[in-house]
Image: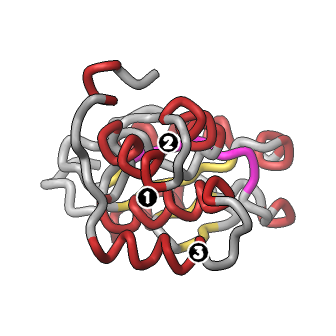
């Protein structure tokens, strides 16, 4: 929930963010129709959508902050708190579960030292569950940043994070 004190701030959007939002608004009959796009645009510049940024977007789209908060929290790829440099989207769908995702998730948590919703101490990774990544035939699967990894097991988790993470000797 957005705190009342934050709603009264004068957060602003950058000219680059406004330009991109305006490009989306050109295709919308109502400003609120660009809500998801505006959130994604601001997130692309800032890494996440703070309460202040959400209020600024809501004002620009002539929406209440509460209505925009409802949109932002409905979509799990709009980050409402800071995330690491790379987000690990781990699929926990039925297909992945049947193929052993619980054990793989445990290995990821051990390897990175985080659980769902948490960010590594070096701010490199944030682990987030997702209901589906659309690769059920190759389950279990995850995305690390923009890279999709399939048929995961303990060995693959070690390979992925040993090659992508300099954890100062941790493993």
Q: Nearer the viewer, residue 5 or 44?
A: 5
Q: Which residue is mark 3?
A: 24
For the residue labelled by badge 3, is the local secondary structure a helix, a strand or a loop?
helix
* Distance of label 1 from label 2 (alpha carbons): 9 Å
Which percent across, then down, holds residue 146?
51, 73
* Residue contact at pointers 1 and 2, CB within 8 angstroms: yes
SS at badge 1: helix
Where is residue 155? Give x, y as percent: 52, 59
Q: Is residue 3 visible?
A: yes
**Residue 107 tag number:** 2
Q: Earlier in the sequence, mark 3 or mark 1?
A: 3
User: Measured along the vertical axis of the image, is residue 105 above or below residue 166?
Assistant: above
List x then y, in percent, for residue 119: 32, 41
Residue 61 image offset from top left, x and y in percent: 52, 54
Spatial separation of the CA atoms under disc 3 and disc 1:
41 Å
Q: Could you tell me which residue is drawn at 40 percent across and 37 percent down?
A: 110
For the residues labelled 3 and 2, the Cα–Cα distance comes to 41 Å
Q: Was residue 128 drawn as part of the magenta stretch in this picture? A: yes
The foreground one among 76 and 165 is 76
Query: Dot 2, how many residues are within 10 Å of its Cα: few (below 14), some (14-19), or many (20+)?
Result: some
The structure residue drawn at horizontal position 71% and vertical position 54%, both measured from the top left corner, is 140
Which residue position holds label 1? 158
Comparing labels 3 and 2, the label whose residue is closer to the camera: 3
Figure colour scheme:
secondary structure
Give the quarter of the image for residue 124. Answer: bottom left
Bounds of the magenta span?
126-132
């Amino acid at each position: 929930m957005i705190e009342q004190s934050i709603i009264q701030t004068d957060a602003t959007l950058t000219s680059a963010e406004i330009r991109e939002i305006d490009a989306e608004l050109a295709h919308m009959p109502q400003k609120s129709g660009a809500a998801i796009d505006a959130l994604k645009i601001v997130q692309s510049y800032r890494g996440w959508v703070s309460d202040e940024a959400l209020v600024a977007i809501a004002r620009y789209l002539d929406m209440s902050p509460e209505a925009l908060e409802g949109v932002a929290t409905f979509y799990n790829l709009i980050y409402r708190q800071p995330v690491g440099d790379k987000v690990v989207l781990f699929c926990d769908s039925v297909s992945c579960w049947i193929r052993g995702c619980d054990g793989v998730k445990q290995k990821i948590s051990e390897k990175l030292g985080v659980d769902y919703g948490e960010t590594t101490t070096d701010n490199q990774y944030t682990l987030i569950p997702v209901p589906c990544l659309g690769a059920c035939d190759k389950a279990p699967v995850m995305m690390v940043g923009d890279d999709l990894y399939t048929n995961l097991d303990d060995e693959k988790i070690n390979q992925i994070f040993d090659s992508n993470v300099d954890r100062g000797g941790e493993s």
